[in-house]
C-alpha cells in the first residue's frame, strides 16, 4: 500500500502530519518514534512549501533486512547546490533556524537526500518498524 | 458510434422537455425536502438543463460509451460544480448524489417507451448509459467528499483562530494555554494577544503551557522563542510548562536550543515557580 499527499498550501502540512500518525498507528510505532517521524515530516514538507512551492509526499512500508516505514518528499523546485552545507546546523537561506535538515537526519533511522540545482529535491526518511 | 447509439442520442434530444420535466419531478420526490427553498426552482431548472445539454453535446461527439474522453470533461466539471454547491447548502450525500441516479432512471424510462424492435440493441444501450451515469455519480460523490473536507478544514481553522485565551490566574501572573497546530498566522495572533495582555494587566510573569500542542518543530520552537523574547522586552518573565517526554526528546534530537529557557514539566510546577518568584505561599488549612 502507498499513500500520496500533495503539498501546496499550509493546511497540507496538517494532512501530512495526520497521515504519519495513521501509518505509525498501523505499525504500532512507539509514541516517541511517532512524534519523531511527525516532526521530521513536518520539517521536510515545510521545506517543500517554502523553497519549492509545491511537491508530493509518498508514504509506504518497505521490506528490507528490517521492515521500515518510509516517507519520500519530492519536489521540482530550485534544488540544493551544496547539500553538505544545507546539512550544517544553522545554515539557512531563508528566515528559519537552519536546523530542519540536520535535525531531521538526527530524528530518523535512515536519511537520504538527492538534489541538484534545477533538478528538484528528493528526501527519503525511514524509521524501523 | 453504432447506428443505435446515434439513434438514442436523437431520441433524447427530441424528448428533451419530457426528460427535464420527469427528472425535475423525480429530484423533488427523492427525499429532497425543502429543495426548492434551498436552491430555488429556477436555479434547479437551470442546473438540470445545463447538465442535460452538456451531456447530449458530449454524447453527440463521442457517445455515451466514452465518458472518460476529454469531450466529457465539461459534463464532469458541471457535475462537480453542482455537487459542491449543493453540499455547501447542507444537503446530505444521498440527497446530493441522487440527482444523477434520478436522471439515469428517467433516461432508461424514455428508452423503454421508444423501445426498438431489436431487444439486443436496447439492452446494450441501457448498459452503456448506466455505466456513463454511474461514472457521473462517482464524480459527484468525490466532489461531495472534497467539499466536506474543505468545510471541515475551514471550521477547524476558525475554531483555532478563536481559541487564544490568556488567563489571569493571579495578580501579575498570566497563563497562555496553547492548543492545536501553531501555524504562522495563528502564532502571530497569540504573540500579539499575550503582549497586549501583559500591558493591560500589568503582569510580569507569563506561563506558556504547551501540553495541548501536538508537535514542536523548528517553526513552533522559533515562535515560542520569539514570543518569549518579546515578552521579556516588555518586562515579563516567561516559563514554559507541559512539555511531554516525547516532545522533550524530539526537541533535543532536532537540535533546538532551549537551554536558556525556564521550563517545568507541569502547569502546577510552573505556577509554584511563579508564586515563589512573587514570594507568595500557598498554605494548607489545618483541619479544625
Ligand atoms: N526542498 C528544498 N528545495 C530547495 N532548497 C531547500 C529545500 N529544503 C531545504 N533547502 C535549502 O536548505 C537550507 C537548509 O534547510 P533547513 O530545513 O535545514 O533550514 P531552514 O528551512 O532554512 O530553517 P528551519 O528548517 O530550521 O526553519 C534552506 O535554507 C534552503 O536553502
Ligand atoms: Mg526547514
Image (spheres, coloured by chain):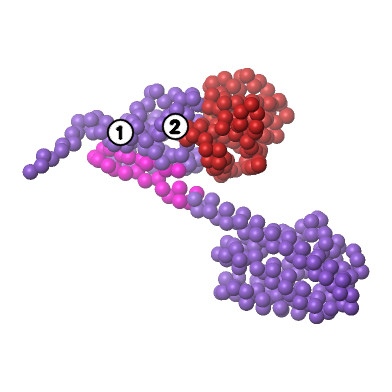
Chain colours: A red, B purple
Chain assignment, label 2: B
When the figure is inspected, residue B160 is found, relative to residue B48, above or below; the finding is above
x and y, in percent, of residue A75 in the image? 68, 35
Tell me if residue A36 can be seen.
yes
What's the magenta region? B157-180
N-term mark: 1 or 2: 2
Q: In which quarter of the image is residue A106?
A: top right
Q: Name the residue under label 1.
A: B270
When the figure is inspected, residue B68 is found, relative to residue B42, above or below; the finding is above
Circle on res. B246: 2
Image quarter hosting the N terminus of chain A: top right
Chain assignment, label 1: B
Cα distance between the residues tagged 1 and 2: 19 Å
When the figure is inspected, residue A9 is found, relative to residue A113, above or below; the finding is below
Q: Which residue is outermost to the left?
A: B288
| Residue drawn at the location 25% of the way across and 33% of the way down | B272
Question: For residue B39: magenta?
Answer: no
Q: Which secondary structure, mark 2?
A: helix
x and y, in percent, of residue A41 in the image? 57, 34
Q: Which residue is outermost to the front?
A: A65
x and y, in percent, of residue B82 in the image? 66, 64
Q: Which residue is outermost to the right?
A: B3
Amino acid at each position: 500500500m502507498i499513500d500520496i499527499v500533495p503539498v501546496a498550501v499550509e493546511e497540507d502540512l496538517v494532512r501530512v502530519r495526520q497521515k504519519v500518525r495513521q501509518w505509525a498507528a498501523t505499525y504500532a510505532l512507539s509514541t516517541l518514534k511517532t512524534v519523531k517521524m511527525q516532526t521530521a515530516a513536518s520539517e521536510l514538507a515545510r521545506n517543500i512549501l517554502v523553497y519549492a512551492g509545491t511537491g508530493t509526499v509518498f508514504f509506504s512500508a518497505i521490506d528490507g533486512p528490517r521492515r521500515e516505514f518510509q516517507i519520500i518528499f519530492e519536489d521540482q523546485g530550485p534544488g540544493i547546490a551544496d547539500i553538505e552545507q544545507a546539512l550544517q546546523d544553522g545554515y539557512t537561506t531563508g528566515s528559519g533556524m537552519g536546523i530542519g535538515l540536520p535535525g531531521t537526519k538526527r530524528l530518523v533511522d535512515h536519511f537520504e537526500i538527492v538534489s541538484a540545482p534545477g533538478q528538484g529535491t528528493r528526501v527519503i526518511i525511514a524509521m524501523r518498524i | 458510434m453504432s447506428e443505435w447509439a446515434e439513434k438514442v442520442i436523437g431520441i433524447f434530444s427530441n424528448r428533451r422537455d419530457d426528460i427535464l420535466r420527469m427528472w425535475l419531478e423525480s429530484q423533488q420526490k427523492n427525499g429532497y425536502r425543502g429543495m426548492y427553498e434551498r436552491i430555488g426552482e429556477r436555479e434547479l431548472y437551470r442546473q438540470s438543463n445545463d447538465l442535460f445539454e452538456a451531456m447530449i453535446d458530449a454524447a453527440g461527439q463521442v457517445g455515451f460509451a466514452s465518458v472518460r474522453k476529454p469531450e466529457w470533461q465539461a459534463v464532469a466539471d458541471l457535475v462537480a460544480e453542482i455537487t459542491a454547491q449543493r453540499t455547501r447548502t447542507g444537503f446530505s450525500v444521498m440527497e446530493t448524489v441522487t440527482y444523477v441516479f434520478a436522471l439515469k432512471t428517467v433516461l432508461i424510462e424514455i428508452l423503454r417507451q421508444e423501445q426498438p424492435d431489436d431487444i439486443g440493441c436496447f439492452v446494450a444501450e441501457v448498459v452503456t448509459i448506466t455505466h456513463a451515469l454511474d461514472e457521473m455519480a462517482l464524480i459527484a460523490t468525490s466532489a461531495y467528499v472534497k467539499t466536506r473536507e474543505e468545510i471541515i478544514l475551514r471550521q477547524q481553522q476558525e475554531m483555532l483562530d478563536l481559541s487564544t485565551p490568556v488567563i489571569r490566574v493571579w495578580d501579575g501572573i498570566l497563563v497562555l494555554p496553547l492548543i492545536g497546530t501553531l501555524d504562522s498566522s495563528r502564532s502571530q495572533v497569540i504573540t500579539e494577544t499575550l503582549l497586549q495582555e501583559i500591558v493591560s494587566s500589568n503582569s510580569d510573569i507569563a506561563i506558556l503551557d504547551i501540553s495541548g500542542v501536538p508537535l514542536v518543530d523548528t517553526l513552533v520552537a522559533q515562535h515560542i522563542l520569539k514570543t518569549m523574547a518579546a515578552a521579556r522586552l516588555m518586562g515579563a518573565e516567561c516559563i514554559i510548562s507541559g512539555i511531554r517526554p516525547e516532545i522533550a526528546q524530539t526537541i533535543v534530537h532536532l537540535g533546538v536550543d532551549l537551554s536558556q529557557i525556564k521550563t517545568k514539566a507541569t502547569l502546577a510546577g510552573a505556577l509554584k515557580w511563579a508564586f515563589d518568584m512573587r514570594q507568595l505561599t500557598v498554605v494548607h488549612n489545618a483541619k479544625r
